[in-house]
Image (cartoon, rainbow, N blue to C red):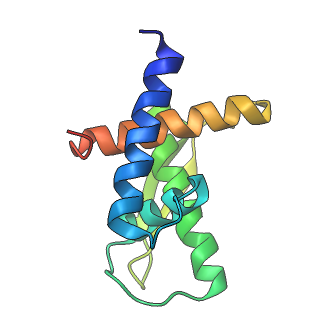
Amino acid sequence: MSKNSNLKEKWDLLVSKLTDQFADGEALNMDGIIYLIGIQELGQGHRSFKKDEKMNLMHIAICKLLEPYGYYEFDFFDDDSWPHYKIITELPNLKPGEQSVLIKEAIINYFDAVAYLE
């Protein structure tokens, strides 16, 4: 099986599983999954978030997802227990399709690390 078909197969399984667990019928998209990862990484449980907090949650998720690739490194928790990351290496200029593949791969690796897909 090629890397791309394996990625697609795992992605479809992940989307299906997360949709069943967290969505009300409509399949979660990549942004929704990134948002869920941000909530998980914040670790403050289920609560309402303001618009700017939602954007910060997505930023936390992206940093966490790209940390194993050497782009970000955890720095500290602020007084409200929000994690902060520092940039280690600038992200390369990627075409939109390449960005999507990188993020999907990082998301799958994130869930593989906790054996969610098994």
Does any portion of residue 67 appear in the rendered image? no
Q: Quadrant of residue 77?
A: bottom left
Q: How far across and how far down the image is residue 54, in percent?
A: 58, 76
Give the quarter of the figure containing the N terminus: top left
Residue 14 sits above or below residue 60 on the image? above
**Place of residue 90 in the rendered image (x, y in percent of width and height, measured from the top left):** 69, 37
Residue reaching furthest to the top: 1
Quarter holding residue 98: top right
Can residue 75 be seen in the rendering of this structure?
yes
**Which percent across, then down, holds residue 9?**
43, 29
Q: Is residue 34 above or below residue 55?
A: above
Please give left or right for residue 41 compared with residue 87 in the image. left
Q: Residue at x 58, y 55 (%)?
A: 29
Depth check, front residue: 17 or 116? 17
Residue at 60% x, 31% y is 101
Closer-to-camera residue (93/8):
8
Identify the image quadrant of the C terminus. top left
Instruction: Residue at 38%, 78% (x, y): give it.
Output: 81
**Residue farthest to the front, as pictured:** 25
